[in-house]
Amino acid sequence: MSFSATIIGEGDLAEYDSFIERCSDALIYHTGDYLRCLRRILPESELSILGVRSAGALVGTLALLSRDGPVGRIANSLPYFGSHGDVIVDGNFRDKSRVSHELMALLSEFTRDQGFSAINIVSHPVKSHISEDAPSVGLQAWDYRTSFITHLPSEDNREAAIEAILRMCQQKTRNLVRKGLRSGFRIEIEDADASWNEFIRHHICSMNRIGGRHKSPAEFAAFRQAFEQRDQCRLYVARDGTTFAGALMNLYYRDCVEYFAPVAVADYRSQQVVSAIIAHAMCDAALSGHIRWNWGGTWRSQAGVRHFKAGWGPAEHDYQYWGKVTRPEIYELRSSQCVQFYPNYYIYPFGR
C-alpha cells in the first residue's frame, strides 16, 4: 500500500473538515472550527496540517500551529491551555500504525524545513497514536497530565438522571451537590451578551484572586463565534433571584462534553453554586445522549483540583506531552520569558 504526504494550509480546510467527520477518535480540538478559533485567538500563529493520503484520500493528519519569537519558531500540536493535538486516523482505515509512522516521518522533515527551535505535541487523552513512533523522530515524553472523564448515565427523565449522577459521586461530593441543589438557584442556559459579560467579569476576578491566568473577553468571543450557533458552546448561569451567583461554560462535540470554564461569585461559593451548576449541566447532557464528560487535563501538582474532579466518579487516564528542543538557547529562557515571548505555547518543561 502506497502513501503520499501533503500539507494543508488554513485556506483549504474543507477536505480536512470532511476527514475529521470520518474519525471516531476526534475531539472538538481536532475540528476545523476549533483550529479556526485558535487562529482568531492567536493571530500571530500559522496553521499547518500534515496529512497522509492513501489512494488519493486523507487517512491521517497532525495539526500544528507555529509562531516566531526571539529564539526562533515554535510549533505546538496544539497550543492554548493544553489543547489536544496528536495524530488522527480515519476510523475506517485498518493500518493505523502505518499512518502514524508516515506522519511522524513527515513531521521530522517538516521540522527540519521550517527550522523549528522547539516542538510539543499534546497527545490524545485516551487514544494516542504517536507513542510508538515519536521516539524514532527524536520526540521524548517530557511531561504528562491526567485526564478525568466521567461516563454519564443513560436515563430518560431528569429525576432518574440526577439520582444516577449522585450515585457516581464520592460521598463528600454527593453531599456538596445536594447542598448546592437545595440552595434554590435558578440554573439556565443563557446566551445574552449581558450574561456573558457577567461571567467574564467574575472569571477574571476569580483568576486574579488565585494568581491564575485568565482568558480575555476576546477569547470567549472567539469561542462564541465558532460554536454557539450550533449549540456547541453553552453558558449555564445560576442566579439567586435575579442576582448572578455563578456560571459554567462547556463545549460540546459528538457524545462528549468538555468542562471548560467554571466561576462562582465569592458570596455564593459556600452554597456550592458550582456543584449545583455541574450537576444540572450533567443531567442535561445525559438526557440529550452525551456519554462522556471530560474534566480536562490536570497537573500532578494540582492536588485540590485533582481531588475535586475525582469526586465526580471519573476514570483517570495519564497522557503525554511529546517534544524536543533543537536550539539549546531555548533552555536559557526563564519561564516568565517563555510566557512573554511565546504566549499560550508550551516550549519545554520548566522543571527539567
Image (cartoon, rainbow, N blue to C red):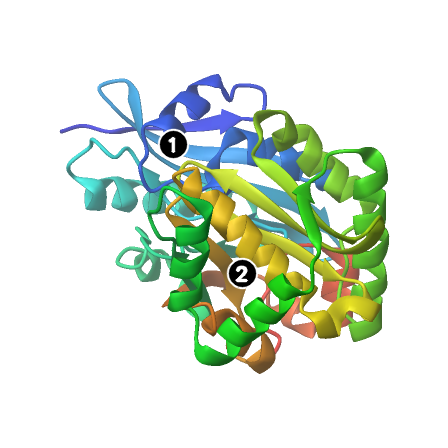
Q: CA distance from mark 1 to mark 2?
A: 23 Å
Compared across the picture, whether 21 is left or right of 238 comes to left
The residue sitting at 56% across, 30% down in the picture is 33
Dot 1 crowding, Cα within 10 Å, few <14, some 14–19, many 20+:
many
Q: Residue 213's image quarter?
A: bottom right
- The mark lying in front, picked from 1 and 2, is 1
Tell me the residue that label 1 is attached to.
51
Instruction: Specify few, some or many for label 2: CA neighbours under 10 Å numbering under 14, 14-19, or 20 or more.
Output: some
Between residues 99 and 279, which one lies in front from this camera angle?
279
On screen, 326 above or below 97? below
Q: Which residue is mark 2?
A: 326
User: Judging from the image, what secondary structure is the residue with disc 2 in?
Assistant: loop
* Label 1: which secondary element: strand
Q: Is residue 79 above or below residue 336?
A: above
In primary-sequence order, the first of circles 1 and 2 is: 1
Q: Position of residue 335 (x, y in %)?
A: 72, 72
Query: Which amino acid, mark 1?
Result: Gly
Q: Residue at x 67, y 58 (%)?
A: 262
Can you see residue 335? no
| Residue at image point 80% right, 73% down | 211
Q: Nearer the viewer, residue 18 or 307?
A: 307
Question: In this orientation, which residue lies closer to the viewer: 190 or 326?
Answer: 190
Residue 42: image x %, image y %?
71, 41
